[in-house]
Image: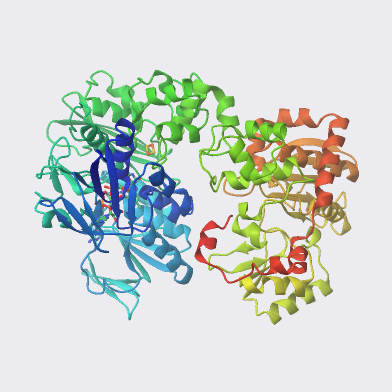
C-alpha cells in the first residue's frame, strides 16, 4: 500500500522548485509529487533571460532542473498544462487539458504576470512583455526583421530588456513615467549617473511620458504619448511591473489581497494549501526577487517535512542591475526621511557614488554606483541590524574597489564573518562556501555552484566566490580546475591525464569511465572532450560531429537571420584577377546579397541559405577559409618589402607560408596570425594570437594578443633570424597551446593564466621545439579540406537541409 501523501504543486518556476529541492533532501520518501507547469519547459532560471537576450548565455544553459531530474525524483510533471480549477473541498485540481489530480497537500507557486498597460493598440503584433523564454525568443526574432524598439518602463526589467535589444542591433528608446530611472531603487544622483552610462552605451530615454496608444496596421509601428509626440517602434516591450498571479486562488476561495495571503509558515487561509513565491503575500508584501522567495522555500520545505523551524519573518532585499559595464546596487530603505541620517560620497572622476542611510545608529539603506564591491558587506550589516556607531566613515569610504579580486591578504573577504551572506539570490554564506572548498574539495566556481548554488542565479556574486576560492583553495586551484563544467568534479588536466592513462577513445566512454554526473554531458563538456580526444589521439580519434557547434558542423558561419556566410581561403590576403572574377561570378550566379571584406583581409559572401552552401563551394572550387571554427582563421599581412619602402622583410611571403603551414589546424579556440614588414606594424600583429613583426635582419615573434572584447597586446616571445625559425617557433607555440590550454580558451587568456615565463621555458630547448613541431606536423598531415570532403560524400551533403530554430540557438561564435 502506498503510504505517501500526495503533494500537488501548481507552478513549475524558481520558487516552487527550490522548495522541492529542500524538501527532497529533508524527506525524500514522504510525498508523491505532481507538478503542473503552464510553460512548455522544465524549471529554468528566469533571471538569466536577461543574459540570454543580451547574448551572454544560451537558452539551453539556463535550465535548472532538466527532465531527468524530475524522473530521478519520481515527480510527475505536466508540462504545458495550466491548472484552471482548484477544488479545496474535494482536494483536487484540474488542468486545461482535463488532467485531474487529487492532493493531500497543495502548493501554489504561480508567480506573477507582467502588467500590460491597457493601451489602445496593445493587442497588436510586436507588443510584448519580458517574462518568459517565449518573450525572449519573440524579441530575438523581431530583432532580425525590425530595427526600432520601445521599452516602456525604466525599472530593472526595462533596462535589462533595453540592453539586450541593443546587443541584438536594435535602436532602443526607454519610455519612463518618472523623471528619472529606477526610482524604486535609486536616488536621483545615482540615477542620473546610470543614465549617462547607459546613454554612452546607445540607449535613448524619454522621461515623464505617459504612453497613450500603439499605432500600426497589424503590427506596432509607433507609440504616442499623452503629452504629445510619438516615436517609431516595431517592437514595444512593456516592463512596468508585475502583478501576483492570484486568479486561481481567488476562485478557490482563498484569502487574497495583492497576493495570496500567507502566514509565517506559508499557510494560506485554507488548511492543507500553501503558497510561496511571487504569488504570495506575507505581512503585506509580495516580493519580486528570488532571494526572499528562496528563503520562503526553505521554511515551507521544513514545514512540509515536519522539521521544527522558525517561521519566515520577511526579508530585507537588495538588487543589482545586470547590465554589463554598469555597477549599481541598492538595498533597504534608501530614501531619507525624518529620523534618518544620510552619508554621501561622490567621486565624479572615478564615476562612483555611495549613499548610506542610518537610523537609530543602524544602517537601513544603501545605494552604490560605479563600485558595488561593498554591497554584500553593507547588506549583511543591514540585515543583522547591528549598531554602526563610530564606523560610519569606514563604511562610507569602504575598502579599495579591487580588494575582492586580489589574492590572499586582500582583507575584507578574509575578515568577513562566516555567517555573512555572499550569494544573496541563494542565501549562501561565506561559511558554507568555505566549507565546500575545504571539506568537499570544490576547486572552481562551477563546483561551488553545484555544491552550494552560490553564483547560480544572477551571477552577481561570482567575484566574491572567486575571491574566496583564491584565499581558501589557492590561485592554482581556481585556475586549473576551471575548464570543464558542472558534470564532473575533475579538472581539465585530470580529465586529459585520465584519457591518456586509460586510452579512452570516445566522448561517451570518457563520461562513463570518469563518472560524469549526467548521461549525455552538456553543451560545455561535449565539445571540450571532443577536442581533447582529437588532440590526444590525432591518428585514431574520429571527430564526433554531433559534439560540435552548428558553425563547425556546417563549415560556415550562421548569421542572425539564419543564413550562412562563406569565406574561401585567400592565403595571406593576396588574391588574383582570375580568383576575383570567379568569386564575382559565383556571387552573381547565386544572387549573394552581400560581398564584404572581413577584418582579416578576406572576402565574405553573406546571406547564403544552408541548402546552397555545397553548390557555392563547388562553384568556387577554393579551400575553406575556416572563418567559423576553433582553428587557424587568417594570417593578415602588410605589403612588406615587396612594395613598401619601409619594409625590411617579405611580410607577404612569410604570411602565405604560415597560412599554408597551419591551415585546417584544430585548436582550443580560434587563432589569428599576422605578419608586418616593419615595426610600423600595419598588419596589427601585436593584437594577434601569434604576431610576427619584421626588424632589421630578423623577426620578432609575439604571442597572446587579442583585438576583441578584451583587448590585449601581445607579449614578445623571442627574436629569430630566418623564416624557417619563424615556422619552427610558431609550430612549437601552437602545439604547446593545443596540448595545454582549456578548450575554448583564447591564447590571450591562456598566456595570462600560465604566464609568459612558463611558455618561454617550455619552448626554449631546440629538442623540445622539434618534438612539438613533429607532433603538430602529424596532426596537420591528417587534415583535409572540409568543403571538398562534404562535396565528395553524398551522405554528408544530405545534411544540408533547410535550417531549424534549434540550430540557430546552438550556433557557436
Ligand atoms: C528577465 C527577468 C530578469 C530577472 N532578474 C532578476 C534578478 O536579477 N534577480 C532577482 O532576484 N530576480 C530577478 N527576476 C525576478 C525572478 O525571476 C522572479 O522573482 C522569480 O522567477 C519568481 O519565481 P516564482 O517561482 O515565484 O514565479 P515564476 O518563476 O514566474 O514561476 C511561476 C510559474 O507558474 C506557472 N503558472 C502560473 N499559473 C499556473 C497555473 N494555473 N497552472 C500551471 N502553471 C502555472 C507560470 O507559467 C510560471 O512558469 C527577473 C525576472 C525576469 C523576468
Ligand atoms: N536585476 C534584477 O534584480 C531584476 C531584473 C529584472 C527584473 N527584476 C524583477 O522583475 C520584476 C519586474 O520588473 P519591472 O522593472 O517591470 O518592475 P518594477 O515595478 O521594479 O519597475 C517598473 C518601472 O516601470 C515604471 N512604470 C510604471 N508604469 C509606467 C508607465 N505607464 N510608463 C512608463 N513607465 C512606467 C515604474 O516607474 C517603474 O520604475 C520586479 O519584481 C523586479 O524586481 C529584477
Ligand atoms: S608594416 Fe612596415 S612594411 Fe608593412 S606596410 Fe607598414 S610600413 Fe610598410
Ligand atoms: S547573488 Fe545572484 S547568484 Fe549569487
Residue 230: horizontal and vertical position, in percent? 30, 72
Residue 91: horizontal and vertical position, in percent? 15, 50
Q: How is the image coloured?
A: rainbow
- What is the total number of numbered labels drawn onto the structure image? 0
Residue 726, compared with residue 767, is above or below; it is below
Of residues 724 and 244, the one drawn nearer to the viewer in this rendering: 244
Which quarter of the figure has residue 387? top left
Left or right: residue 511 versus residue 15 is right
Where, quadrant-wise, is the N terminus in this rendering?
top left
Left or right: residue 133 versus residue 782 is left
Which quarter of the figure has residue 724? top right
Residue 748: horizontal and vertical position, in percent? 65, 41
Say which residue appears at 60% left-offset and 30% top-offset: 480
Does residue 320 appear anywhere in the picture? yes
Say which residue appears at 50% left-offset and 24% top-offset: 441
Does residue 743 appear anywhere in the picture? no
Say which residue appears at 70% left-offset and 42% top-offset: 505
Say which residue appears at 78% left-offset and 68% top-offset: 792
Which quarter of the figure has residue 245? bottom left
Left or right: residue 381 versus residue 771 is left
Of residues 631 and 692, the one drawn nearer to the viewer in this rendering: 631
Where, quadrant-wise, is the C terminus in this rendering?
bottom right
Residue 774: horizontal and vertical position, in percent? 86, 40
Extreme residue in the front direction: 1
Amino acid at each position: 500500500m502506498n503510504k505517501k501523501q500526495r503533494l500537488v504543486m501548481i507552478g513549475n518556476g524558481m520558487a516552487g522548485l527550490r522548495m522541492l529541492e529542500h524538501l527532497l533532501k529533508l524527506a525524500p520518501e514522504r510525498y508523491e509529487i505532481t507538478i503542473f507547469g503552464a510553460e512548455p519547459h522544465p524549471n529554468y532560471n528566469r533571471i538569466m533571460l536577461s543574459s540570454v537576450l543580451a547574448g551572454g548565455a544560451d537558452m539551453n544553459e539556463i535550465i535548472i532542473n532538466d527532465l531527468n531530474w524530475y524522473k530521478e525524483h519520481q515527480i510527475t510533471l505536466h508540462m504545458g498544462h495550466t491548472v484552471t480549477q482548484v477544488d479545496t473541498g474535494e482536494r483536487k485540481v484540474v488542468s486545461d487539458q482535463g488532467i485531474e489530480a487529487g492532493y493531500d497537500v497543495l502548493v501554489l507557486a504561480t508567480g506573477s504576470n507582467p502588467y500590460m498597460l491597457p493601451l489602445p493598440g496593445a493587442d497588436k503584433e510586436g507588443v510584448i512583455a519580458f517574462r518568459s523564454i517565449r518573450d525572449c525568443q519573440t524579441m530575438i526574432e523581431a530583432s532580425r526583421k525590425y530595427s526600432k524598439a520601445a521599452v516602456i518602463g525604466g525599472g530593472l526589467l526595462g533596462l535589462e530588456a533595453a540592453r539586450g535589444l541593443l546587443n541584438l542591433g536594435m535602436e532602443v528608446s526607454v519610455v519612463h513615467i518618472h523623471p528619472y530611472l529606477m526610482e524604486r531603487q535609486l536616488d536621483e544622483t545615482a540615477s542620473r549617473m546610470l543614465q549617462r552610462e547607459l546613454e554612452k552605451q546607445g540607449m535613448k530615454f524619454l522621461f515623464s511620458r505617459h504612453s497613450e496608444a500603439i499605432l500600426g496596421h497589424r503590427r506596432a509601428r509607433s507609440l504616442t504619448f499623452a503629452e504629445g509626440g510619438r516615436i517609431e517602434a516595431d517592437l514595444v516591450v512593456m516592463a512596468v511591473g508585475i502583478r501576483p498571479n492570484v486568479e486561481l486562488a481567488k476562485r478557490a476561495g482563498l484569502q487574497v489581497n495583492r497576493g495570496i495571503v500567507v502566514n509565517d509558515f506559508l499557510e494560506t487561509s485554507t488548511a492543507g494549501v500553501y503558497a510561496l513565491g511571487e504569488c504570495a503575500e506575507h505581512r503585506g508584501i509580495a516580493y519580486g526577487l528570488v532571494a526572499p522567495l528562496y528563503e520562503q522555500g526553505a521554511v515551507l520545505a521544513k514545514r512540509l517535512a515536519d522539521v521544527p523551524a522558525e517561521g519566515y519573518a520577511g526579508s530585507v532585499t537588495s538588487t543589482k542591475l545586470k547590465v554589463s559595464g554598469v555597477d549599481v546596487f541598492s538595498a533597504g530603505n534608501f530614501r531619507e526621511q525624518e529620523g534618518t541620517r544620510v552619508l554621501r560620497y561622490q567621486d565624479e572622476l572615478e564615476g562612483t557614488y555611495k549613499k548610506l542611510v542610518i537610523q537609530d545608529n543602524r544602517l537601513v539603506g544603501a545605494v552604490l554606483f560605479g563600485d558595488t564591491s561593498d554591497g554584500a558587506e553593507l547588506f549583511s550589516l543591514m540585515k543583522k541590524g547591528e549598531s554602526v556607531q563610530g564606523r560610519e566613515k569606514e563604511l562610507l569610504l569602504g575598502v579599495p574597489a579591487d580588494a575582492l579580486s586580489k589574492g590572499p591578504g586582500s582583507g575584507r573577504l578574509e575578515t568577513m564573518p562566516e555567517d555573512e551572506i555572499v550569494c544573496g539570490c541563494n542565501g549562501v554564506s561565506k561559511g558554507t562556501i568555505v566549507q565546500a572548498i575545504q571539506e568537499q574539495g570544490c576547486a572552481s566556481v562551477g563546483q561551488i555552484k553545484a555544491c552550494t548554488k552560490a553564483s547560480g542565479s544572477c551571477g552577481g556574486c561570482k567575484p566574491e566566490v572567486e575571491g574566496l576560492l583564491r584565499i581558501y583553495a589557492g590561485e592554482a586551484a581556481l585556475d586549473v580546475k576551471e575548464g570543464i563544467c558542472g558534470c564532473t568534479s575533475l579538472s581539465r588536466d585530470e580529465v586529459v591525464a585520465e584519457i591518456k592513462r586509460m586510452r579512452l577513445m570516445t566522448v561517451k566512454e570518457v563520461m562513463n569511465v570518469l563518472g560524469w554526473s549526467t548521461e549525455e554531458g552538456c553543451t560545455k563538456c561535449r565539445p571540450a572532450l571532443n577536442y581533447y580526444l582529437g588532440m590526444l589521439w590525432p591518428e585514431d580519434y574520429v571527430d564526433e560531429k554531433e559534439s560540435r557547434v552548428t558553425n563547425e558542423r556546417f563549415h560556415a558561419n550562421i548569421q542572425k537571420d539564419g543564413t550562412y556566410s562563406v569565406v574561401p581561403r585567400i592565403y595571406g590576403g593576396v588574391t588574383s584577377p582570375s580568383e576575383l572574377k570567379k568569386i564575382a561570378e559565383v556571387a552573381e550566379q547565386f544572387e549573394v546579397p552581400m560581398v564584404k571584406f572581413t577584418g582579416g583581409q578576406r572576402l565574405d559572401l553573406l546571406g547564403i541559405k544552408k541548402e546552397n552552401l555545397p553548390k557555392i563551394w563547388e562553384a568556387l572550387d577554393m579551400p575553406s577559409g575556416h572563418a567559423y571554427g576553433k582553428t587557424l582563421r587568417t594570417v593578415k599581412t602588410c605589403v612588406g618589402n615587396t612594395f613598401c619602402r619601409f619594409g625590411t622583410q617579405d611580410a607577404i611571403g612569410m604570411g602565405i607560408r604560415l597560412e599554408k603551414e597551419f591551415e585546417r589546424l584544430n585548436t582550443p579556440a580560434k587563432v589569428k596570425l599576422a605578419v608586418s614588414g616593419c615595426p610600423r606594424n600595419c598588419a596589427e600583429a601585436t593584437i594577434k594570437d601569434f604576431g610576427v613583426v619584421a626588424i632589421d635582419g630578423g623577426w620578432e615573434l609575439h604571442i597572446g594578443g587579442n583585438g576583441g572584447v578584451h583587448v590585449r597586446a601581445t607579449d614578445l616571445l623571442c627574436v629569430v633570424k630566418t623564416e624557417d625559425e619563424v615556422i619552427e617557433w610558431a609550430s612549437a607555440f601552437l602545439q604547446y597551446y593545443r596540448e595545454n590550454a582549456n578548450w575554448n580558451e583564447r591564447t590571450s587568456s591562456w598566456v595570462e593564466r600560465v604566464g609568459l615565463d612558463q611558455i618561454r621555458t617550455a619552448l626554449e630547448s631546440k629538442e623540445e621545439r622539434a618534438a612539438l613541431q613533429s607532433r603538430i606536423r602529424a596532426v596537420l598531415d591528417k587534415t583535409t579540406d572540409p568543403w571538398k570532403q562534404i562535396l565528395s560524400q553524398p551522405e554528408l551533403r544530405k545534411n544540408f537541409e533547410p535550417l531549424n530554430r534549434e540550430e540557430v540557438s546552438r550556433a557557436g561564435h
